[in-house]
Amino acid sequence: MPNGAQALMKTLVDAGIEVCFSNPGTSEMHFVAALDNEPKMRAVLALFEGVATGAADGYARMADKPAATLLHLGCGLGNGLANLHNARKGKVPIVNIVGDHATYHVKYNAQLQSDIETVARNVSPGFVRTSQTTEQLCQDAAEAIAAAKGLPGQVATLILPADVSWGEGGVPCAPLPEPELIAADDATVQAVAEAVRSDKKTAILLGGRALREPSLMAAARIAAHSGVKLFAETFPTRIERGVGLPPVERIAYLAELATLQLSEYDNLILVDAKPPVSFFAYPGKPSDLVPEHCTLYTLSTPEQDALSSLTKLADVLGAASAEPELQKPARPSRPRGKLTAEKVCKALGHMMPENSIIVDEAITSGLMLNAMTAGAPRHDIITLTGGAIGQGLPSATGAAIACPDRPVYALIGDGTAMYTIQALWTMAREQLNVTSIIFNNASYSILNVELERVGAEEAGDKAKSQLDISGPVTHFAQLAQSMGVHGIRVHTTEELLKAMEYAQNTPGPHLIEAIVPESLNGVKRKVLPWLLRSLPSLPRPVTKALKQKIAP
Ligand SMILES: Cc1ncc(C[n+]2csc(CCOP(=O)(O)OP(=O)(O)O)c2C)c(N)n1
Ligand SMILES: [Mg+2]
């Protein structure tokens, strides 16, 4: 008879969970020992729990199945919470295994004793369970896995007391049957089809899994046939794009620009997406970005299957054989001159190979990323779904483990990079094909923009110092070297291109630290809030041109 941990390991791999991102402690030792009995389980050590959880997120986005995390009690789980939050918002499946004290030890309130379930509930509202007996453990695990994998994907947390783990008499459990995918019902499809056929201006907002190729193609056929506009949500979990795929305009991060994008539509059809809302509240500005005159329709919810719902809609509209608009090749030219964040994005668009995976956590330095890569060969972009920074380097780690044959580019702000910089160590240890590009602008630049936008203009030196990371300036290339990652600092566009070419031709992880000015600095930063405020009073062609300039 296996012990609990051994049976749990078998239950996990039988359900297709083959990677465990771990940061263990004493209470997880039997699980750690059980790794040796299970050749199908790959164990990947992370030096901070936020790296383990972010890697599990990036892995699942690319592998289309969950990984497990192994975390140490409430404190370990707490350290991993921000990236579990990003996974939750992205509807990404993850199975957390959180070790706990032995059941009989709890009453002594030892040092690490804490309320793990309360910590877990925030990111795992649909499934938190403390397994009570070794016999029951694997049934609990199978249910956790099923909860994580069902639509919408979610974070499931299984708490594993040490005695349940080491106890004899574990019984591996076969995977539970996969639930059937449910398409939108006929009445809903008919109502949406009527909206599309009406003479009102109609847009479809695609989110979640609707941003993957099959759904995009179905939506693009509908667009080609019926003239509806296609939008993508602001922060896609994973969007497939580039040459040969339908181009889709993303809703802008800046609420004023999003309002502008949506203002001309009378109907908005949601497909695996929420109605757009402002990222933050700003004094005197609306939170709800759907125009008042606009009618909302939901073709399919995150619990339903976007692809079969869109296919049904296309059939009802007679759009099934329409010729979709597809992106043509259009790479930017090789950048030259002074190095800027925009030129880094341009260099990427110029040279990235087909099937690249881009993890975008470049914050203000990535303003031009979408435009510069739109006509590049086919690729995926992963974004910061929950707004909790420190996701990019871990996520790139997980994506590279899911897709070892695909180049991964992690585009990361310098402030953001410092939250989970330990991911570099895991990239080196696992020899992952990740090129991390850090935009060192020595600033929390976006917060300086936000400072002006929220109207807190009287900020003095003490306030401004909280948004300034220029003293000391972090040396990311040296940090990378110290963790076994080839690292180089570049000051010019030529140096950047050389470093990118070297990274492309040399397997294993690389870090390129680009010393760049802030994308929104000086006059631009001062003018932006004023410009955004005046958008509603400007003529439409002018506002469209401005949107194109600020956030193409
Ligand atoms: C977990 C978490 N902590 C803090 C923040 C607030 N925050 C948003 S962006 C940012 C700084 C980003 O700086 P950087 O990565 O350098 O990008 P830049 O603004 O310079 O483009 C901070 C601290 C957040 N979003 N999430
Ligand atoms: Mg910065």
Image (cartoon, grey):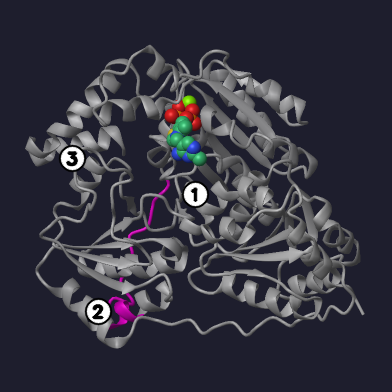
Q: Secondary structure at mark 2?
A: helix
Crowding at label 1, few (<14), some or many (≥20) Cα neighbours within 10 Å? Answer: many
Out of 91 and 355, give the one closest to the viewer.
91
Q: Image quarter for residue 274?
A: bottom left
Task: Residue type at mark 2: give it.
Answer: Leu
| Residue topped by disc 3 | 544
Looking at the rendered structure, the secondary structure element under dot 1 is strand
- Depth check, front residue: 436 or 388: 388
Residue 317 is tagged as 2
Q: Are marks 1 and 3 in contact (CB under 8 Å)?
A: no
Considering every residue shown, the one lying at the far front of the view is 108
Query: Which label was assigned to residue 409?
Result: none
Q: Is residue 472 left or right of residue 8?
A: left
Q: Is residue 346 visible?
A: no
Which class describes the residues within 10 Å of circle 2: few (<14), some (14-19), or many (20+)?
some
- What stretch of residues is rendered in magenta? 312-329
| Residue mark closest to the camera, 1 vs 2 | 1
Magenta segment, prevailing SS (helix, strand or loop)? loop
Q: Is residue 411 visible?
A: yes
When asked about the image quadrant of residue 216, the answer is: bottom left
Looking at numbered disc 1 in the image, what kind of residue is underneath it?
A: Ile
Quadrant location of residue 366? top left
